[in-house]
Image (tube, rainbow, N blue to C red):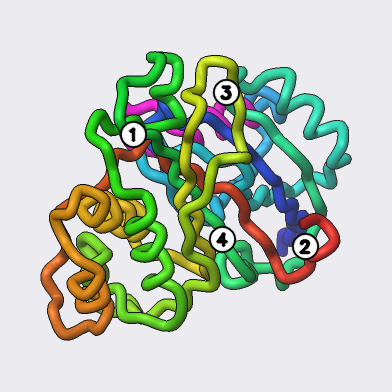
Amino acid sequence: MPVKKETYHYLVYIQYLGFRYHGWQKQPGLKTVEFMVEKTLNFIFKGLPFKILGAGRTDAKVSANHSAFMLFSNQKLEPNELKTQLNLNLPNDIRILKIREKGADFNIINSVREKEYVYLFAHGHKAHPFCASLVVTFPDRLDIGLMKEGARLFEGHHNFVQYCTKPSKTVNFNRDIFISEIVENKLFQADFFPEEIFAFRVRSKGFLRYQVRLMMGQLLCLGRKQTSLDKIAGTLTGQERRPLRHIAPASGLVLNKIIYADDRADE
């Protein structure tokens, strides 16, 4: 009877600029981040078997400042050496931050303690074209003060059934939002950025499909006086189930941080 090979588990922290990718997950005929990672690992491992599993999916053009995937291998790896090899061979818009060996009981999906997204935007002018990969600029003037009030409505425990597209039959729409705020951008800086950029920052244990972009869409409608604070509050009760229509463009969205239960020292 053949001896079952031991499987080694590695948590790999990754960051990438999503502007030229069709999201994280592999899709036939499309360039995705997962495809590029697998292609690079195949080159490094020279055909030896492995599997990877992402911490979640990001959509086309969405970036990640701090995300993760699980690497399963039948050979024991040296994390720092693998990190060096990956960064030598991955495209310049993908970088490995850290690799940690984990036990077989670690679950990359269920062990998430918090995820934080930020949505970067400017308004009232057309920005430098180099901003397009990270910052969405809206030519109309927005009422930022009103949008800040609206962002705070999302904090707490709410039903986000209207903030999800094509959900599965078993999905739970009730979510706890730990932080929801609009602040001046201090996360990312560049000489060609507008002087004033704002960040919609939202943190929770997990998010529904398109949830953050739909939340940002409602804040944009609020900033344009196309909706009201009372109407946004009404979308969080679960009484109306039709998905909201206004979804913010993808390129301003960044998965800024993913935190696991044992990551407190890394924050």
Could you tell me which residue is drawn at 41 percent across and 15 percent down?
128
Q: Is residue 30 within the magenta segment? A: yes
The answer to whether mark 1 and mark 3 are in CB contact below 8 A is: no
- In the foreground, 253 or 69: 253
Please name the residue that numbered disc 3 is placed on.
93
Question: What percent of the width, then of the height, locates residue 124?
Answer: 30, 30
Q: Is residue 204 within the magenta segment? A: no
Sequence-wise, the earlier of marks 4 and 1 is 4
Q: How many marks?
A: 4
Q: Nearer the viewer, mark 2 or mark 1?
A: 1
Q: Which mark is residue 123?
A: 1
Question: Which residues are drawn in magenta?
Answer: 26-41
Kind of residue indicated by mark 1: His
Calculate the distance from the C-alpha at mark 2 to the C-alpha at mark 3: 25 Å
Could you tell me which residue is drawn at 33 percent across and 34 percent down?
123
Calculate the distance from the C-alpha at mark 4 to the C-alpha at mark 3: 22 Å
Kind of residue indicated by mark 3: Asp
Kind of residue indicated by mark 4: Lys
Please name the residue that numbered disc 2 is placed on.
263
Q: Secondary structure at mark 1?
A: strand
Please name the residue that numbered disc 4 is placed on.
115
Q: Is residue 199 above or below residue 16?
A: below
Looking at the rendering, which quadrant does residue 48 occupy?
top right
Q: Secondary structure at mark 2?
A: loop
Question: What percent of the width, then of the height, locates residue 95?
Answer: 66, 30
Sequence-wise, the earlier of marks 2 and 1 is 1
Neighbor class of circle 2 (other Cα within 10 Å; few <14, some 14-19, many 20+) is few
